[in-house]
C-alpha cells in the first residue's frame, strides 16, 4: 500500500486531499448535530441534519455525473471543494439557527455529489489496471484510520474551546477543503485527461437527457448489476447500524458504551485485511471475492445479533470487517476496470443518488423492524438475507463472467474474419 503511494505521487496527493477533507468534516458533523440538539432539545431536529444531507445527495447525484463527464473531472473536483469551503466557512459568521444548519448541510451534500464521481474518474486516470486493487485498498485503509482518529480529535478540540469559540470548528473544516484544492491543482495542471465527450455537440444542453440516459448503460452489464445489487443490499442493511447495535447491546444488559469497542473492532478488521489482503485475493475469481465476501459479511452480521457477550461480538465485528474489506476492494476495482471512462462520472453519480434513497429507506425499515421484533432479530434477519444472496451471487456472477468471456471471444473471432 505505502509503496504505491510513494511511487505514484499524484495518486498520493489525490488520496491525501480526500483524507484531509474527511478528517475536517467530523468537526462540522459533530458541531451541527450537537448544536442542533442543544438549541432545540429535539432528536427530530438533530436527525434533520442527516435528512438534509441525504436529500441533497439524492437530488444532485442523478445529474452530477453528467457534469463530471462533460468537463474536466479535476476542475469539477476543485470547484466542488472550493464551494464546500466557502459554504462551511459561512457557518462561522451566520446566526446559529437550525434552518441555516439544514441549508448548509444540503449544499455541502450537493457539492459532495460532484466531488465523489470526479474523484473516482481522476483515480481511474492515475492508476493502471495492475495497481487498481491495491489503490482501492489504500483508500479504504486511510478512510478507516480517519474514522477512528478524527472523531476523537474533533471532540478533544471542540471540548477544549470555550462555548463562544466552538464555531471555529467550521473554519477548521473549511480549511481542509482549501488544502484539498491546493493538492488537486497540480494534478489538474500536470495530467493529460482524456476528452470526456465525443465532440462539441455533446456539450450542448439539449443533449443532456441523452447523456443522462447513457449513464445507465453500465447497469445493464450482468456482472456489474449483480455487484450493485449486493452493494445496495448492504447499504440498506447497515442504515442506522449504530442505533440498532446500541439497542442490541443495551438489551443484552451490557454498557451502551461498548458499541465503541465493536465499531473499533470492525474498523480494525477492515484496516488489517486492507493492508495484506490485496495480494492474497488478487488471484481469486471475482465471483468468489464478491459473493464470498457478502456471504461472510452475512454470517458475522448474524453473529452480532446471535451473541450477547462482548468478546464474541468483538470477534464477529473484526471478521465482519475483514470480509467488508474484501468487498470494498473488489467492487470499485471491477467498476474501474469495466465501466467505460467516458461514463465513469455518470455511473458513480447515479450510484450515489440510489444510495441516498436506499439509506433513507433502510433507516426507516431498520427502525420499524427494530421496534416490532427487536434489534437482535434485525441483525439476524438481515444477516441471513446477506448470507443467502452472497452464496447465490457466487454462482450468478460466475455464470455472467463466463458468458462475457464467451461473447468477447466470439466478437474477436468476427473481427479477425
Image (cartoon, rainbow, N blue to C red):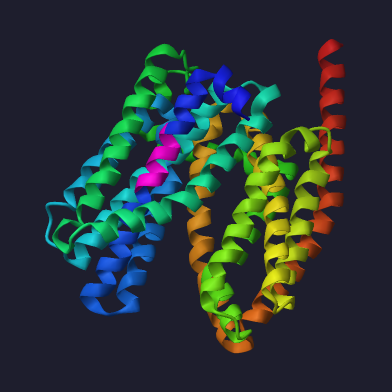
Residue at the spot 82% in from the left edge and 23% down from the top edge? 411
- Say whether residue 60 is magenta: no
Q: Is residue 189 left or right of residue 86?
A: right
Residue 232 in view of the camera: no
Q: Is residue 226 left or right of residue 155?
A: right
Q: In this view, does 233 lie to the left or right of 356?
A: right
Residue at the spot 24% in from the left edge and 61% down from the top edge? 101
Residue at the spot 26% in from the left edge and 45% down from the top edge? 172
**Depth check, front residue: 243 or 392:** 243
Task: Examine the rendered structure and indicate whether residue 275 appears above or below residue 306.
Answer: above
The percent coordinates of residue 28 (x first, y second) are 31, 54
Residue 194 in view of the camera: yes
The percent coordinates of residue 269 (x first, y second) are 67, 52
Which residues make up the magenta segment? 17-24
Q: In this view, does 168 lie to the left or right of 57?
A: left
**Depth check, front residue: 59 or 178:** 178
The percent coordinates of residue 99 (x first, y second) are 21, 65
The percent coordinates of residue 415 (x first, y second) are 81, 14
Where does the N terminus fall, quadrant-wise?
top right
Main SS type for the magenta part? helix
Residue at the spot 60% in from the left edge and 78% down from the top edge? 249
Amino acid at each position: 500500500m505505502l509503496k504505491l503511494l510513494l511511487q505514484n505521487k499524484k495518486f498520493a496527493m489525490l488520496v491525501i486531499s480526500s483524507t484531509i477533507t474527511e478528517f475536517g468534516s467530523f468537526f462540522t458533523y459533530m458541531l451541527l448535530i450537537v448544536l442542533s440538539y442543544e438549541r432545540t432539545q429535539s432528536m427530530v431536529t438533530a436527525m434533520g441534519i442527516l435528512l438534509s444531507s441525504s436529500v441533497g445527495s439524492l437530488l444532485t447525484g442523478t445529474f452530477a455525473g453528467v457534469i463530471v463527464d462533460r468537463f474536466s473531472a479535476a476542475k469539477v473536483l476543485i470547484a466542488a471543494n472550493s464551494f464546500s469551503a466557502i459554504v462551511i466557512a459561512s457557518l462561522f459568521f451566520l446566526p446559529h439557527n437550525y434552518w441555516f444548519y439544514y441549508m448548509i448541510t444540503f449544499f455541502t451534500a450537493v457539492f459532495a455529489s460532484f466531488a465523489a464521481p470526479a474523484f473516482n474518474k481522476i483515480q481511474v486516470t492515475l492508476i493502471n489496471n495492475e495497481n487498481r486493487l491495491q489503490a482501492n485498498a489504500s483508500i479504504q485503509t486511510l478512510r478507516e484510520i480517519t474514522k477512528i482518529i478524527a472523531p476523537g480529535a474533533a471532540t478533544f478540540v471542540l471540548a477544549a474551546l470555550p462555548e463562544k469559540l466552538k464555531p471555529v470548528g467550521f473554519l477548521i473544516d473549511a480549511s481542509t477543503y482549501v488544502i484539498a484544492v491546493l493538492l488537486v491543482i497540480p494534478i489538474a495542471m500536470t495530467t493529460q485527461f482524456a476528452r470526456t465527450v465525443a465532440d462539441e455537440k455533446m456539450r450542448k444542453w439539449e443533449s443532456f437527457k441523452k447523456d443522462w440516459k447513457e449513464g445507465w448503460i453500465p447497469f445493464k452489464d450482468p456482472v456489474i448489476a449483480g455487484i450493485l445489487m449486493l452493494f445496495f443490499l448492504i447499504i440498506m442493511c447497515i442504515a442506522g447500524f449504530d442505533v440498532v447495535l446500541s439497542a442490541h447491546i443495551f438489551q443484552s444488559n451490557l454498557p451502551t458504551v461498548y458499541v465503541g469497542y465493536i465499531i473499533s473492532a470492525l474498523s480494525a478488521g477492515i484496516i488489517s485485511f486492507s493492508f495484506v489482503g490485496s495480494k492474497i485475493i488478487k488471484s481469486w475469481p471475482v465471483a468468489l471475492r464478491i459473493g464470498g465476501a457478502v456471504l461472510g459479511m452475512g454470517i458475522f452480521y448474524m453473529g452480532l445479533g446471535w451473541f450477547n457477550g462482548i468478546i464474541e461480538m468483538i470477534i464477529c465485528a473484526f471478521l465482519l470487517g475483514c470480509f467488508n474489506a474484501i468487498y470494498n476492494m473488489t467492487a470499485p476495482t471491477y467498476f474501474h476496470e469495466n465501466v467505460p471512462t467516458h461514463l465513469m462520472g455518470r455511473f458513480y453519480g447515479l450510484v450515489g443518488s440510489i444510495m441516498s434513497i436506499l439509506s433513507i429507506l433502510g433507516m426507516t425499515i431498520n427502525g420499524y423492524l427494530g421496534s416490532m421484533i427487536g434489534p437482535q432479530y434485525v441483525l439476524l434477519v438481515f444477516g441471513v438475507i446477506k448470507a443467502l444472496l452472497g452464496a447465490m451471487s457466487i454462482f450468478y456472477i460466475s455464470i455472467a463472467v463466463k458468458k462475457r468471456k464467451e461473447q468477447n471471444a466470439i466478437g474477436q473471432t468476427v473481427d479477425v474474419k
